[in-house]
Amino acid sequence: MLNTLIFSCIIGIYSLNGMAITSTDINNNLKYEKNIYKDCNMPINNSFKSYMSFKTITNRNSKQYELQKLAYTDNSTGIRMIDDNYCIAVGTGVGASVGDRISVIMGNGEHINCVVADIKADIHTKSDNIQTIADNSVIEFIVDVKQVPTLAKKMGDMSYVNYRFEGEIEKIRVYK
């Protein structure tokens, strides 16, 4: 029998394209099967963890925008969170959609629970559509820039925020 996890329900009704929808409709992956997933192995040299401001998500009709209404900012890291999952952006090559729950599995064995809150444009990634051209990152944390710690901001790398984020990413597990 499969174990089913249900993330805490966030009460609210939002409007997307003029239609009333619940927060469950916004993120249809609040319920997912823990034992049903797809692993995506990562390219090498991916230890850099970039970040982007949540304020750059401006399309009010997008799922990304609606997810940011549900998110809060972790005061110690500046990272946006939904239900204790870090908000990140990934490339299309990972095979995840906005709202999907994923685990970033580090080379050091750490599992970092995340929610896909944005998708990187293919034009900004290498031919694998996973790793960025600019800095080789495979995940991009969505943050409130004002709250990102000074060293991470100076380095441009969220690896400096938490020891769990240090090093290479082995794979990304996308839950269905």
Image (tube, helix red, strand yellow):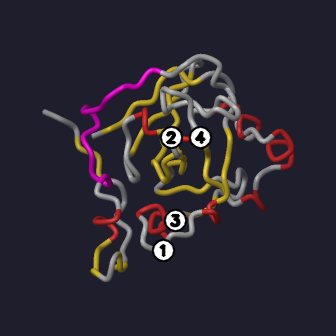
Q: Nearer the viewer, mark 2 or mark 3?
A: 2
130 to the left or right of 8: right
Dot 1 alpha-carbon crowd within 10 angstroms: few under 14, some 14 to 19, many 20 or more: few
Q: Nearer the viewer, mark 2 or mark 1?
A: 2
Q: Which mark is residue 68?
A: 3
Q: In terms of secondary structure, where does tag 1 sit?
A: loop
Is the residue under label 2 in contact with that under label 4 (CB below 8 Å)?
A: yes
Q: Nearer the viewer, mark 1 or mark 3?
A: 1
Dot 4 alpha-carbon crowd within 10 angstroms: few under 14, some 14 to 19, many 20 or more: some
Query: How far separated are the C-alphas under marks 1 and 3?
Result: 10 Å
Judging by the rendered image, the residue that carries numbered circle 2 is 122
Image coords of residue 35 (percent x, y)? 26, 32
Judging by the rendered image, the residue that carries numbered circle 1 is 60
Query: How far separated are the C-alphas under marks 2 and 3?
Result: 22 Å
Q: Which mark is residue 92?
A: none
Query: How far separated are the C-alphas under marks 1 and 4?
Result: 23 Å
In the image, 95 versus 1, the foreground residue is 95
Q: Amino acid at mark 3?
A: Gln
Image coords of residue 82 (percent x, y)? 49, 57
Dot 2 alpha-carbon crowd within 10 angstroms: few under 14, some 14 to 19, many 20 or more: some
Q: Is residue 113 above or below residue 10?
A: above
In the image, 16 versus 84, the foreground residue is 16
Q: Is residue 98 above or below residue 139?
A: below
Image coords of residue 25 (percent x, y)? 28, 66
Q: Name the residue located 63 percent from the left edge and 24 percent from the top edge.
A: 46
Q: Nearer the viewer, mark 1 or mark 4?
A: 4
Q: Name the residue located 46 percent from the left edge and 56 percent from the top edge.
A: 83
Query: How far separated are the C-alphas under marks 4 and 2?
Result: 5 Å
**For the C terminus, which image quadrant?**
top left
Q: In terms of secondary structure, where does tag 3 sit?
A: helix
Q: Sequence-wise, which precedes: disc 2 or disc 3? A: 3
